[in-house]
Image: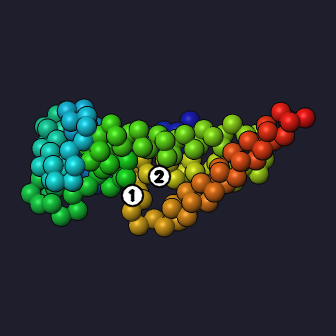
């Protein structure tokens, strides 16, 4: 077990410092948070083209990312081609600011909490995909072309409405009795 742990740690450490993807994403995430903190109400789509590369430049000049492979993210400083954090959450955090955080909470997180309140075994197959979609949107995907995410959200919306109506009817019946 110790031998496996040592080898695993060396492999992870090597990947952290040689992976272009990790350097790009980590730098992009930090840059996005910097833009959000300096512009909490968002910068919109047009401001993104100016502020995001500036934030990347600031992050690259820090010691936090100095040991990472930053060749891909440095390309974002010279062109707008593929300029993005590559995640839905961090892109929209810059675009919409606090309004997006409220929307994200209302649309995704609050819905997860709603389904988590129920201990029904069959809701396990609803909670896991929803949690996966939330985490994937924060870590590595954008929702724009992910029709399966939107089908899931539509299904969950209908299911949530049915569960609320069922509970309201049950409460109404118990009051009438």
Can the viewer see residue 133? Answer: yes
Secondary structure of the residue carrying numbered label 2: helix
Quarter the C terminus occupies = top right
- Quick check: 104 above or below 145? above
Which of the two residues, 176 or 110, is positioned nearer the viewer here?
176
Residue found 21% across the figure and 57% down from its top: 83
Secondary structure of the residue carrying numbered label 1: loop
Quarter the N terminus occupies = top right
Which of the two residues, 93 or 69, is positioned nearer the viewer here?
93
Can the viewer see residue 31? Answer: no
Horizontal and vertical percent position of residue 65: 23, 39
Q: From the viewer's perspective, tell me whether residue 107 is left or right of residue 177.
A: left
The 10 Å Cα crowd at callout 2, few under 14, some 14 to 19, many 20 or more, is: some
- Measured in 3D between alpha carbons, the distance from the residue under mark 1 to the one under mark 2, in whole angstroms, is 8 Å
Disc number for residue 52: none
Horizontal and vertical percent position of residue 23: 28, 48
Q: Residue under label 1, please give it.
A: 142
Residue found 15% across the figure and 49% down from its top: 47
Q: Residue under label 2, please give it.
A: 136
Residue found 69% across the figure and 45% down from its top: 164
Horizontal and vertical percent position of residue 41: 25, 37
């Amino acid at each position: 077990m110790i031998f496996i742990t040592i080898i695993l740690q060396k492999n992870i450490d090597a990947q952290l410092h040689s992976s272009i993807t990790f350097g790009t994403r980590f730098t992009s995430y930090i840059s996005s948070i910097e833009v959000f903190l300096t512009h909490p109400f968002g910068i919109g789509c047009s401001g993104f083209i100016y502020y995001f590369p500036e934030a990347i430049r600031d992050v690259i000049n820090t010691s936090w990312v100095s040991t990472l492979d930053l060749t891909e993210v440095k390309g974002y400083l010279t062109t707008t081609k593929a300029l993005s954090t590559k995640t839905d959450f961090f892109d929209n955090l810059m675009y919409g600011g606090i309004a997006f955080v409220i929307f994200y909470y209302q649309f995704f997180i609050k819905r997860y909490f709603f389904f988590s309140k129920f201990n029904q075994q069959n809701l396990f197959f609803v909670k896991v995909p929803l949690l996966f979609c939330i985490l994937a949107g924060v870590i590595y995907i954008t929702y724009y072309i992910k029709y399966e995410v939107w089908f899931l959200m539509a299904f969950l919306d209908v299911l949530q409405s049915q569960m609320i109506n069922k509970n309201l009817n049950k409460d109404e019946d118990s009051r009438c009795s």
